[in-house]
């Protein structure tokens, strides 16, 4: 399985590099590349009342730009604030099985919560959210284990509590999905 990291709008290059380097530690990936293209954040995703961007519109744009294929997952990374209907915000969203996936760094920095800058925390959170959304794109649902990266994050506290790793059950399931030739 390959992952293509696709920046959407201006994105901190340290995030892209950290994901490229570390994603294979937590998911069975052969290759992670950073796209040379940077897509514009789609204007039709913007809700002027919420002042946020609808994540499903960004997923549609990613699919149109690079149609999903069996052996590749595309991970969009954006700096804008994302929402989904019924939720105040989302850290990311993915389509199940073939993707695409997207994460937002907007709510991941300690500064956003009034804390001092801490790159280690910021990049660690981005990695967790990326593993989580790619987990969905590899066929995983949410996990009840609050330490598992597939646990649903309702807030940054949930993100900080959970690990970067898939739990044993989720890890086995991903390997079965890949082996089953579903992809
Ligand atoms: Zn999720
Ligand atoms: Zn799990």
Image: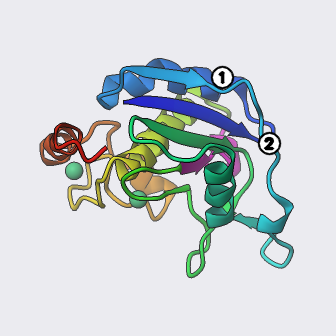
Q: Is residue 113 visible?
A: no
Give the x, y percent position of residue 17. Answer: 60, 20
Q: Which residue is mark 2?
A: 9
Is 110 magenta? The answer is: yes
Q: Quadrant of residue 117?
A: top right
Which residue corresponds to the image point at 15% horizontal and 42% vertical from the top-left? 176
In the rendered structure, the answer to whether residue 13 lies left or right of residue 182 reads right
Q: Position of residue 121 (x, y in %)?
A: 53, 33
Nearest to N terminus: mark 1 or mark 2: 2
Task: Check residue 86 in the rendering and tell me which mark sits there, or answer none.
Answer: none
The residue that disc 1 covers is 14
| Residue 168 magenta-highlighted | no
Please state which of residues 81 and 93 is positioned toward the viewer in this rendering.
93
Left or right of residue 93: residue 1:
left
Extent of the magenta region? 101-116
Query: Picture quarter containing residue 146?
Result: bottom left
Viewport quadrant of the C terminus: top left
* Distance CA(mark 1)–CA(mark 2): 15 Å
Q: Position of residue 18 (x, y in %)?
A: 55, 22
Q: Is residue 91 visible?
A: yes
Q: Is residue 48 above or below residue 36?
A: below
Mark 2 close to ligand 1, CB under 8 Å: no
Residue 158 left/right relative to 178: right
Instruction: Between residue 149 and residue 44, name the one nearer to us.
Output: 44
For label 1, count other residues whose C-alpha is less than 10 Å away and answer few (under 14), some (14-19) or many (20+): few
Q: Quadrant of ligand 1?
A: bottom left
Instruction: For the residues labelled 1 and 2, say whether their Cβ atoms are less than 8 Å apart.
Output: no
């Amino acid at each position: 399985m390959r992952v293509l990291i696709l920046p959407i709008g201006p994105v901190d290059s340290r995030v892209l590099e950290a994901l490229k380097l570390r994603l294979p530690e937590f998911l069975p990936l052969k290759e992670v590349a950073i796209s040379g293209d940077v897509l514009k954040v789609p204007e039709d995703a913007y809700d002027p009342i919420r002042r946020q961007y609808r994540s499903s519109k960004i997923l549609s744009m990613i699919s149109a730009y690079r149609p999903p294929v069996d052996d590749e997952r595309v991970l969009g990374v954006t700096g804008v604030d994302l929402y989904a209907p019924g939720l105040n915000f989302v850290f990311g969203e993915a389509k199940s099985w073939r993707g695409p996936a997207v994460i937002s760094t907007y709510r991941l920095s300690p500064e956003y919560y009034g804390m001092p800058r801490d790159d280690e925390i910021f990049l660690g959170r981005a990695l967790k959210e990326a593993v989580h959304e790619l987990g969905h794109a590899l066929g995983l649902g949410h996990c009840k284990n609050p330490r598992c990266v597939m646990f649903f994050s309702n807030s940054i506290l949930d993100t900080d509590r959970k690990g970067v790793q898939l739990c044993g059950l989720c890890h086995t399931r991903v390997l079965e999905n890949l082996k089953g030739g579903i992809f």
